[in-house]
Image: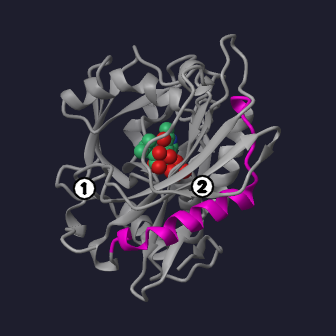
Amino acid sequence: MENMNWSDLTFGYIKTDYNVRCYYRDGKWGELEVSSSEILNLHMAATCLHYGQEAFEGLKAFRGKDGKVRVFRMDENAKRMQASSRGLLMAELPVEKFEEAVRKAVRLNERFIPPYESGSSLYIRPLLIGTGAQVGVKPADEYLFLVFVTPVGPYFKEGFKPTPVCIMREYDRAAPHGTGNIKAGGNYGASLVAGNKAKEAGYSAVLYLDPREKKYLDECGPANFFGIKDNCYITPQSTSILPSITNMSLMQLAEDMGLTVERRSVPVEELATFEEAAECGTAAVIAPLSRIDDLDENKSYVYSTDGKPGPVCEKLYKKLRGIQYGDEPDTHGWVQVVL
Ligand code: PLP
Ligand code: COI
């Protein structure tokens, strides 16, 4: 792509050349189709519009120093989309079909994959929606699976620099046994008011507490949470958070580095004991936290005052990015070379 300032990309939508689509009709999935249109032709009574039969995924492709293009752990995204389908009674797409669509979408849009030096990547957005018409609250009999891609920079404009987040008990993104553990669009709709309020007050995100008791940490609006103390990686276990593939990978890398890993309920007060804290996810990568303000309790937990991430976050970030861009050996078999 000429005239593209790859290093200045934000996390926004840029039109690319093609998207890949697959339709579920008469009880089966069809062949993959390639489209150059950004528009969907949708029935006005489609269940995705009325009853929230909608789930999405997010993953990335990275251009390496060697020129190769690697996609990170897409089998996990495919399996998570199946879990989302089960949670919303949507047709399940086979893992192989998901992977084939991702490879196709990346290859067809090769000219939009940012160069290695830019530090940017190609964001891949798979989407699954109920397209069949219903008026009663019932699952659709037809579905559309679609993959589009768009080149992106950092999710938070600060990138790998620490930012503050806040706790606000009057909002939840999900119910205790609701849809928080799947990637349903409704969770994000539910997070918009609190997210906006947080941004207006200068925070990068909201750190949600468990919706039942408000005693334990859940996750941030667009990413999981982890804390570091005494050579230990600690991350919440909860029925209302999304099982993050980045977090799962970081737990493995932390273990490889000799840290102990604890996935358990994390009481809010424990925030006072962490040496480092961060958000993690595909879009966020690792976004270190400078401070967590508990706005209801009028308390602040401070992790960084010099604008720098802590040493463990730094090490994990380098390792993860190294594997994704092909600079480090992929000892766990996480990357698939697609170009
Ligand atoms: N939690 C939420 C609510 C998310 O939207 C995301 C983003 O996908 C994550 C966590 C991180 O998940 P992953 O690491 O699989 O991208
Ligand atoms: C991702 O990290 O891929 C996400 O989906 C987070 C956000 C953009 C919704």
Q: Tag 1, which secondary structure? A: loop
Q: State the residue in front, 252 or 324.
A: 324
Q: Which mark is residue 248?
A: 2
Looking at marks 1 and 2 on the same chain, the residue that comes earlier in the sequence is marked by 1
Magenta-highlighted residues = 87-114
Residue at the extreme right of the image, as rendered = 27
Q: Which residue is mark 1?
A: 161
The structure residue drawn at horizontal position 71% and vertical position 26%, both measured from the top left corner, is 140
Q: Which mark is residue 329?
A: none
> Which amino acid, by three-letter code, is at mark 1?
Lys
The structure residue drawn at horizontal position 25% and vertical position 45%, both measured from the top left corner, is 163
Q: Is residue 325 above or below residue 144?
A: below
Colour scheme in use: one colour
Quadrant holding the N terminus? bottom left
Q: State the residue in front, 29 or 318.
A: 29
Q: Tag 2, which secondary structure? A: helix
Question: Would you identify the image quadrant in which residue 83 lies?
Answer: top right
Q: Is residue 338 above or below residue 39?
A: below
Q: Which x, y percent locates residue 211?
A: 54, 20
The structure residue drawn at horizontal position 25% and vertical position 68%, both measured from the top left corner, is 6
The structure residue drawn at horizontal position 26% and vertical position 23%, both measured from the top left corner, is 197
Crowding at dot 1, Cα within 10 Å, few <14 / some 14-19 / many 20+, comes out as: some
Query: Is label 2's Cβ within 8 Å of ligand 1?
Result: yes
- Residue 9 appearing in the image: yes
Q: State the residue in front, 91 or 297.
A: 91
